Image (spheres, helix red, strand yellow):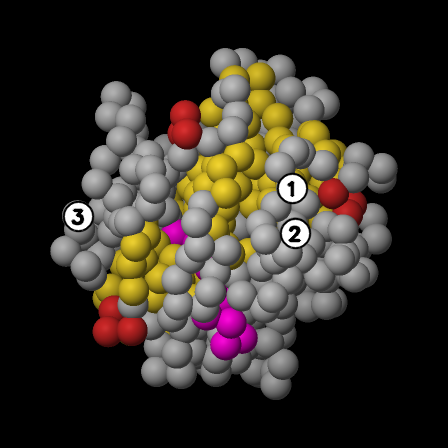
Amino acid sequence: MALWRKGLVVGVAVAAGIALVGSPAGAAPKKRPALPGDVNGDGRADVIAGAPLLKAGGKTDAGAVVVWFGGTKVSAKARIAISSKPVAKENLGQVVATADFDRDGHADVLASARKRIVVFRGSATGLRFSKSFAWPVTNAPMQAADFNGDGYGDAVVQGNKEIVVFKGGNKGLTKSATLKNGAAKFGAVLAVGDVTGDRRPDLVATNFRPAYPEPTGPQRVTVIPGNAKGLAMARAWSFEPARRDIVDVVAGDLTGDGKADLALATGEGGVLVQKSSGSGFGTPQTLAFDYYPANLAAGDVTGDGRADLVVHVSADNHDWAELYSGTATGVTKKASRKYDRENYETLFGRAMWMANVAGDAKVDFIAGMPGVYGIGEIHVLPKGSYTGLQRLKLGSRASDGVGSSLP
């Protein structure tokens, strides 16, 4: 049974390896910030996923954020964090981002909900509700990283005709700036990577995300460099992409030269891979697909010092993912690996994340499988391989939507 005090969950409801985690306890800031996704502070990323269809506090589709602790073998125990006051059909967790916002040695999570965004603090036992902000955009795109290099994780969230910057600090996130370029849908797609090569993360944002029935639209891609003074449009630069139907963007060092390159998923047009020069991007390399590339992820699963690109492909009732290895000039022309097990009506790859959950020298591939009917599951593929595959779920046949969102 859940216990309630002053509007915060302070008890836990346990069932089949599931724990509902309560309100935050105070913690003195640590000198070294946690790695992104390392909720319990053990030096390894944890598997974090939204569960936007989960019933919480007796409220249907209230939603939650779920954490499985990382390790050589990821913990099967799901720790579920819910809002202080669950709301029916709020769908908390439809979008999530992670960084150590208060520099206490535990990664925190920012999650979307209907008409608000919610902050959860990390701890040795899991995530705990911290605070929320009223928000004009439902399921707003968001990203998190230490953009100003002060050791505190920051966050950016698409707002009303602008991108809102939240600065991290001892008390967590506070609004600090807005980024505007005149476009109504600035920040429709957001990505983070060190494009300039100065060892500080930069923000990449598009103006527009196509939605049926409009296949294309006016798009620009804008790079806003990280800076000790914070993100600012005065330092931003933009370019017109070769196509105007961009549905996703990822930034990763595919070539191994210390600068994050871009990959743009373009609906029917395939994927465009563009090498970064530090102040611009080269001629696109095009990866062609018979079906629709939708989501992208990048990370070094092979351990060769170059990020690899993973592309989620959607085809009617089947979904799969393909891995393209990084090279000195971009990525391999053909897929090095294909992830297509159990791909019928599972929505495999609807969300994807590359993170080091094992704590070794290589990145692991994490794929969401929310399923057509919302019966969710997460697949963890160590070092991007089916060898040692782990399947994570909440243990219930009820629709919870797990796998529809990852950081």
Q: Amino acid at mark 1?
A: Thr
Residue in view at x 54 percent, y 66 percent: 259
Residue in view at x 19 percent, y 59 percent: 181
The answer to if 88 sits in the magenta stretch is: no
The answer to if 193 sits in the magenta stretch is: yes
Q: Residue furthest left?
A: 182
Which portion, as a residue range, is magenta?
190-199
Q: Earlier in the sequence, mark 2 or mark 3?
A: 3
Q: Amino acid at mark 3?
A: Ala
- Helix, strand or loop status at disc 1: loop
Q: Examine the residues drawn in magenta and state their main secondary structure.
A: loop
Residue in view at x 53 percent, y 50 percent: 407
Q: What residue is pinned by disc 1?
A: 332
- Helix, strand or loop status at disc 2: loop
Q: Badges 1 and 3: C-beta atoms under 8 Å apart?
A: no
Q: Earlier in the sequence, mark 1 or mark 2?
A: 2
Check residue 327 in the rendering and tell me which mark sits there, or answer none. 2
Check residue 184 in the rendering and tell me which mark sits there, or answer none. 3
* 73 and 1: which is toward the camera: 73
Q: Earlier in the sequence, mark 1 or mark 3?
A: 3
Separation of residues labelled 1 and 3 (CA atoms): 36 Å
Horizontal side of 367 relative to 180 (left or right) equals right
**Does residue 310 lie above or below 228 as drawn?**
above
Residue in view at x 28 percent, y 49 percent: 240
